[in-house]
Amino acid sequence: MREFLKRKNIEVSVKRYLVDALGAMAQGLFCSLLIGTIINTIGTQFGIGFLTVPVATVAGVEYTVGGLATAMSGPAMAVAIGYALQAPPLVLFSLITVGFASNALGGAGGPLAVLFVAIISAEIGKAVSKETKIDILVTPLVTIGVGIALSAWWAPALGKAASSVGTLIMWATTKQPFIMGILVSVIVGIALTLPISSAAICAALSLTGLAGGAAVAGCCAQMVGFAFMSFKENKWGGLISQGIGTSMLQMGNIIKNPRIWIAPILCSAITGPLATCLFKLEMNGPAVSSGMGTCGLVGQIGVYTGWVNDVAAGSKAAITAFDWIGLILICFILPAVLCPIFNKIAMKLGWVKEGDMKLQ
């Protein structure tokens, strides 16, 4: 069995499933749901006609350009997961159907259902791939058959469970904004820097509202914090790659000296409750944006999209100067100021030294 799994490139490991697959799923979400949302926002805010009018009608539902991209989030996630698992072509293409089914049946918690169903379908598809002379029939039939069966069996329950956990977190944040602001901000921020996907986690839990705002704060504390803390070592290239790229670049240095992580974690513990208690910063855009931080400014675009949607729905009177001040302070200014200060203290205590955050 071990030899068979090795030959089929089936590796049952935490890295393969919770690092590679989860990270790829977030990229699939970015290339569908997030891009679609951004396109819709640009079209609406700048009055671009061809981005706001329906370009296709499917089963009586009209879709804009951005709407078409958003509608493909399930297939995009599944194919991304299959790619991360190094699935052969017939398995990879079959996952399009699997992703659509699991995401649709999973409801609000669709991304979590896609993750589980796509992984199992891909691995079973890989197991049967090229084992028969009619591979072009067997592999798609098995992959899609397993995927549809698991989607019907598991997806509704997985989606409901993920949605319930997310709802609980959001409810707790509204009831205890200070404590939950700290917890959500710190935990999601840490997840962003770890080699797992904070964006996929937020998407799977449908984390929006105040909890989503705290998540954005935590992610920004890590990304902007590390960017400015390490500016002396990494200059402008490091500032950009970490500030609007990912703080995951520091993971190797964190393993060498975990104490370089103290400053951004402390910062997230401050900006999180400020976001929930003082500025009432809410993520009412796509849940995946809650875990993106300043990566491509997706977190900020998500918050802005939420404002626009709230104004259109009548639940928010207007976008105020206080809204913008809160967003800029929480996402950029406070991490850029607080993290270097905390890091200086850590250096005086001898916990951190120059060069500890140098990127290779």
Image (spheres, rainbow, N blue to C red):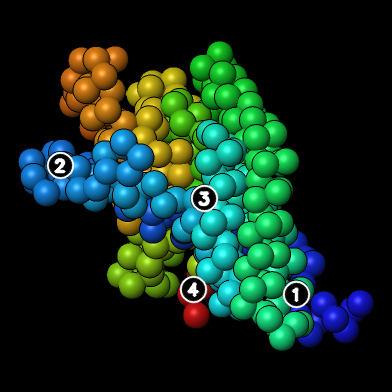
> For the residue carrying disc 4, how many other residues have a C-alpha within 10 Å: few (<14), some (14-19), or many (20+)?
some
The kind of residue tagged 1 is Val
The kind of residue tagged 3 is Phe
Are the residues tagged 1 and 3 within 8 Å (C-beta)?
no
In-front residue for pair 93/226: 93
Of callouts 4 and 2, which one flags the residue occurring earlier in the amino acid sequence? 2
SS assignment at label 4: loop
Q: Mark 1 points at which residue?
A: 128
Of callouts 2 and 3, which one flags the residue occurring earlier in the amino acid sequence? 2
- What residue sits 30% from the left and 70% below the top? 236
Q: Distance between the residues labelled 4 and 3?
A: 43 Å
Of callouts 2 and 1, which one flags the residue occurring earlier in the amino acid sequence? 2
Q: Mark 4 points at which residue?
A: 358
Q: Mark 2 points at which residue?
A: 53
Q: Name the residue under label 3.
A: 100
Of callouts 1 and 4, which one flags the residue occurring earlier in the amino acid sequence? 1
- Asked whether residue 13 appears in the rendered view, the answer is yes
